[in-house]
Amino acid sequence: MSRRVPTLSRLLLEERPADPLVAWRTGERGVDREVRWEEFRHQVASLQLELARLPRGQVALYTADSYALAVGLFAIWHAGRVALCPPNGQPGTLEALSDLVIAGVSDGPGAVPGRPLLSPEARPGPAPLRTAWSPLAPDAVAVELFTSGTTGRGKAIAKTLAHLEREVQSLEANLGPRVEGAPAIGSASHQHLYGMLFRVLWPLATGRPFHARIFLHAEEILTRVRAHGSCALASVPAHLKRLAEREGFLPLARHCRVVFSSGGPLAADTAERWERAAGEAPIEIFGSTETGGVAWRQQGRGRENAAWAPFPSIRVGRDAQDGRLRVHSPFASLGDEGAGFAMGDRVRLLPDGRFVTLGRADRVLKIGEKRLSLPDMEERLLEHPWIEAVALLPLERRGETRVAAVVVLGEPGREALRAQGRRALRVALADSLAREWDRVLLPRAWRFVDALPEDAQGKVTLRSLQGLFAAREGAAEGESP
């Protein structure tokens, strides 16, 4: 028997029986409150009316709460607008949106300068419960999500409703039996495509309730899943590693019907710890903002676990020149029908259709589920009056990737170093970046040198930069506070 195919374009037209549960929201004193279908539609309608009074254009959508994001998305779409979802709510990030949007929607104080700020919470007054919902146009641009990109500067990637709808349909067709009856919960940010799909749109479309909060501690998650009996946990590799090392991990793992991971490769030992505790390893999703989900794998003992299997609707190939993965996908925002989209990962194709990744072909890092273009951050640092030259590089620290910085100071920077000391200098430089990047992406180790190390050909090599940190591996000096 075929599974019900969920649609996003007609979602609010559905008359769901018995006012079903949509989400849990954490209220006062940490107590979860149930939100049901009619309340959801009422809040969407209320915000839609406010948005309809504004000029046409994009609307910035940044929320701490996943349910608030769901209200914002559907209100923006039914008001005929496009949701622009920044990767974070840092002041510099929001300032950069001022010329791109007509308003902002947020459940917090963060506002786009010079633009009205609307709340996704319903206003007092008559409840517009009988709104005449119309189907949404699948081919219209619905959302723009920010990515570091596989090459060059970061950019906004447009997704039509059809892109999102097809991917939700694919997830349900391929993974639906694994999550059936399991509430969605997780730590992946809903401002990124993976979290938006797995924690909000997929559950919402298929009638599975979801937790609106991002949970970072095993005890918080365990309290919720014990009440429900099971859950579908959507997380990222760094968080799954931390959970596996904390008290409460075993009972939590046993309550997880299925665990999803995306944003980077999951370490094999972390996958095995989850398999021993939960009975199976997490399902890892390989993809990008541009392509959507491309492939999956499930590491564990006693199986060929390094290869990725493309989803049924995806075709992959290998670029003959640089070995990068080329993707043909109905979810992809970029890439033409003939060439497909070239991702930033080099791969080896296997005879059975799977592929093995061989590392990045560019200078884009994945830290948690967040992506960072090293050239973008270098460019911003070079604008600082203290800095004459800079090189950023990835460093492995206790099994996690972090950013390191090698800096050549100009005379103003040397004066600041003499007057303030190394620690104050590092803090000031990090703070200058924190307006645009989440702190997890900021350099954790710094070296101040007279000149960037060059080889015989005058090139600054990764190996020479790494050597500056290997000499003082583990030293507290040079690590960011």
Image (cartoon, rainbow, N blue to C red):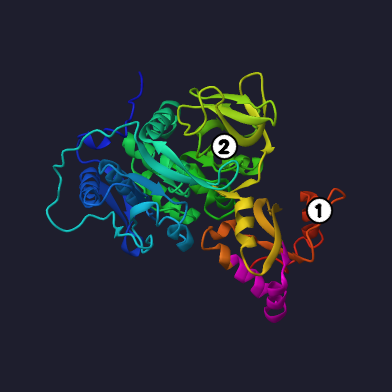
Instruction: Tell me the quadrant of the picture where the C terminus can be found.
Output: bottom right
* Farthest-out residue, left: 126
Residue corresponding to mark 2? 281
Q: Is residue 251 visible?
A: yes
Where residue 99 sits in the image (x, y, percent)?
40, 55
Label 2 or label 1, whichever lies nearer to me, is: 1
Element assignment for label 1: helix
Amino acid type at circle 1 is Ser
Q: Which mark is residue 71?
A: none
Which residue range is magenta in the image?
A: 407-430
Residue ID at (32%, 25%)? 4
Residue corresponding to mark 1? 464
Where residue 470 sits in the image (x, y, percent)?
80, 57
Please say whether residue 212 is one of the residues in the magenta stretch: no
Where residue 136 sits in the image (x, y, percent)?
27, 34
Q: Horizontally, is 369 left or right of 395 in the view? A: left
